[in-house]
Structures are given as C-alpha cells and as structure tokens.
Image (cartoon, grey):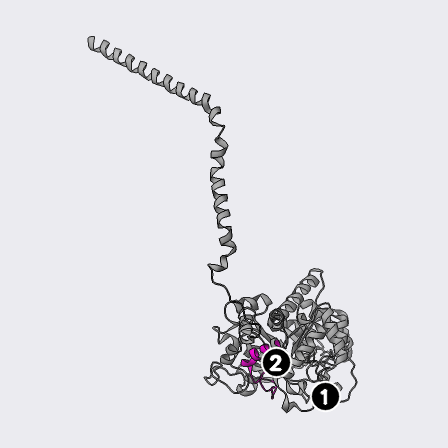
Amino acid sequence: MAETASRAENELRRDSLHQTQTTLDASVDENAIVIHPQRSRNGWLRSWQGVLVAAGFGILLTPFISLGSWFMPAEEPIDPTNYALRTRRVLETTPLIDGHNDVPWLLRVELQNRIYTGKFDPNQRLLGHTDIGRMRQGMMGGQFWSVYVQCDKAQKHFEDPSWIVRDTLEQIDVAKRFIAESPEVFTYCETPSCARTAFKNGKIASMLGIEGGHQLGGSIAAIRQAYDLGVRYITTTHNCDNAWATSASTVAYGQPDRGLTPFGAAYVREMNRLGMMIDLSHVSHQTMRDVLSLTRTPVIFSHSGAYSVTPHLRNVPDDVLRSIRSNGGIVMAVFVNRFLNMQDPSVVTIHDVVDHVWHLAELAGWEHVGIGSDFSGTPFTPTGLEDVSKYPDLIELLMARGATDDQIRLLVGDNILRVWGDIQRRAREIQNEGEKPIEEEWEGRKWHAGYKHSPYMYRETRERAAREGWGQPEQFNVANAGQSSPAVKDGKDL
C-alpha cells in the first residue's frame, strides 16, 4: 500500500511539472505573438533581401555581359576585299543549290543505268563536269538533278507512240539509286525544309526535275504520277513542241510562236494545284508570257540567261524579267556558252556569266535570281567555270562587282528555297479550297475502243460496241496435253 501511495504521488508530481512546462511554453508563444508587430517594422527588408542582392549582382555583371565578345570567341571582321573569305563564310552558312545538272542522263547514255558493276564511282575524279570530290570543293549544298530524255525525232506528232515515257521512268529510277548509293554525301529531298536540314547535316540535298513536257506523253495524269515519284519541277518544253506549249527551238527554226495551247492552260492549273514548279527554260517567249498571265504560283527558269545581254531565244527578255519580280519567281543563270555569247561561244569566260547574273538581278531584283549551270549536259563551259568546283570563283567575282553578302545568300540558295516553299504553300491553299485534279485531255487524243462483248457498265457503251463492231480479244484454250487449241472466236466463250 505504501508503495502504491508513493507511486501515485510521483505520477501527480510529473503531471504537475508537465502542466507547468506547457504553461511556460504557451507563455513564450503568447509573448512571441505579442512582440511580432514590433519585428514587422524591418520584416520587409528581410523578405526582399534576396531579391535586392540578386538585382545588385545583375547590375554589377551588366557591363561584362554587354562586353561578352571580350570573353567569348567571335568572328573577326572581314576585309571587304577579301572575297575568298567572304565567299567561304556565306557558303558555310547558306546552301549553294544548282538548278540543273544532267548526270542522270550520262548514267543512261554511258552506263545504260547500270551503276553497280564497279565501273562507276562518283568519288573518283571523272571526266566531264561533275563528281563528288569537285562538288565538295565547290562547296555545294544542293542539286536539282535533271531527268532528261531527248525529243524523239521519229515522232511526227506528240501523240505518236514513243519510248520517251519509259526512258523517263527509268531515269527517275537511276537518279534515285545514284543518290542513295552515297548516303554520306547526298540526301534525297522532296521539300525545301528537307534541303535545309540536309545542308545543316553536312549533306548535299538532291532533288529531281524533268526537262521537257514531251517526256510525259501530253498527259496531265502523268504529271501527277511524276509528282508522286518525287519530281519537283517540269520544264514545260524542251526542244520540241508538245500538247501544252511552243518551244524556243520551234521559233528559232522559223515557225510561229503560238505560245501556250488551250490544253496548256489546264497544265498550268494542275501544276499549281499539285505544287509542282513550272520551269520556263526552253519555252518560247510567248509561252513565258502566257504562263505568267495564268499561273497562281511563282514560276522558275532552271537554266536561262538574259536576252538583253545575249539575244538568244533561250534567254529571258526584259519584260518577262519584270514580270518575274511581281510573280515572285526566279531565273537561275545558265553557264552554256552559246547562250552567253552567240557570236563567238569559244571566247566565253566566267565574266560573261557575271554580266548575265548582274542584268537578271537589276531587272528582276536580287530576290529573284539563282544559279542553274547545266553542267554535265552542255558540251562547252566558260573559261573559269569548267566544272562544279568553280562556284566559289563566280561568287568572288560577283562580290568584286559589288554584290553584298546578303545578296549572294539570296542568289546561291535562299531564293530557290523561298520560291519552292511559296509554291508548296499556295498548292495547299488551292487543295484546301476543294479543287479537284484536272481531268482534261488534249482535244485530238484518240481513245482505244474496248471489245464487243465486254461487261460494260452502261447500255450506250454496249450499243456502240455492237454498232461499230469493236471486235474480240485474242484468246486461246489449252488442251489437256498443255498445248493451245485454236483461238476462240465464239462470243459465248468470251
């Protein structure tokens, strides 16, 4: 009992001490609450102390930030007359894109499209104008490879049967395979954004253009298929007329310049709707004007010169150059000797190209000029512009003539990429408006008939087939022995 009483007394003492401590704690808390308003007189200073310190530190650093070039590496100012260094800096940051090179044509003519036999190696120094080593030396950033098949002289009319479309398809194929064989060098592109990305990655963007509407058999449906295959421009004519337009060569031979045909207007509409670039190199002057009066998108000249400088019909007259300015298109200066000096092509030099570029820029504006050499197609080139390694030399001479770095950037690549992008954007607008693919055909086209007893959808077709005697398909039966029996002609067996 005594133990129990003592234990109870100790517990009461601990409880009393605990209550006393709690009371003291509460008293402290109350005092803290009471004196808090006195502390608040300087509290704002403590609450903003971190901000003020950071701001002061920033003010102290401002002179050093503004003079960051003292501490970080930057490009040194360039002597304006150091054209080589200026050229290098421009071409290191802006892709030099040539509008026309005929290497795929050489692959067909020389190798019959066989590039895997071990004979063809574009990394080796080749004869002619183009190989990978010289493209790198020329600081190229992009190339439109031409899919070119010459006009068929056996065709008396563009509707006559020919091998042209077949060879065009094969040349698209070999061009793509050629590009794919060197992935460390080339990037195949179908959009301007791809071309810019390829350049940033150190690759040469590679695109396709068909050099002549005759290569599509006068078919607008074939244009759509070419676009699906990756072709991004079509030269409206080459050196022969087609269902759409008159060529410059026709006029040169003394024939009238009829310009665009009525069916050519449908060609322009579908090219605009697709976003396929309309190339007016090789067309007659009236065809140029007709297309510019109808097109809803900018146009290009992939390889042409200035008619006022050299009055060759392949070049662009001044009124068309002024129209290009308002159209938003581009003329890409050509390197073909006979287009640069008709009187004596053998004396043409790089300076003649400078003269043409300068006139194009003066009339159309620096925003509407580019480079389209025709390397590996033209047999003769200007002295000083012998091959694809010489582009920097041309740029240096243009700078010496007075071109600014910004103008050169436009010339070498920014213009063609802008024009291409504008054409694609306008095409999307046209398609979003609900415009359907063009179904028009050349008015003189002849359609093949069917067979007399085919399972036609409409009665009028059956009646016409019977009335005109459309005939039967050639069929044969195979006997049990596996040998063919005479052809079946009885309608009930068809």
Give the mark nearer the N terminus: 2 vs 1.
1
- For the point 47% across and 24% down, the residue is 38
Q: Quadrant of residue 268?
A: bottom right
Q: Give percent across and percent down for residue 145.
A: 58, 77
Residue 93 position within the rendered picture, expressed as x and y whole percent measured from the top left: 54, 68
Residue 141, above or below 339: above
The residue lying toward the viewer, choosing from 104 and 229, is: 104
Q: Quick check: 466 above or below 48?
A: below
Q: Residue at x 58, y 74 (%)?
A: 97
Q: Label 2, on which residue?
A: 373
Image quadrant in which you'd find residue 399: bottom right
- Nearer to us of marks 2 and 1 is 2
Other-residue count near label 1 (Cα within 10 Å), few / some / many at <14 / 14–19 / ≥20? few
Q: Is residue 93 left or right of residue 314?
A: left
Amino acid beneath label 2 = Ser
Q: Label 1, secondary structure: give it.
A: loop
Q: Is residue 215 left or right of residue 180?
A: right
Alpha-carbon span between mark 2 and mark 1: 31 Å
Q: Residue 484: give x, y in percent of width and height.
A: 57, 84
Camera-side residue: 329 or 265? Answer: 329
Q: Is residue 429 above or below residue 265?
A: above
* Residue contact at pointers 2 and 1, CB within 8 angstroms: no
**In this picture, residue 457 sits left or right of residue 347:** right
| Residues in magenta, as a range | 374-398
Q: Is residue 465 visible?
A: no
- Decide whether residue 189 is among the magenta residues: no
- Name the residue carrying label 1: 156
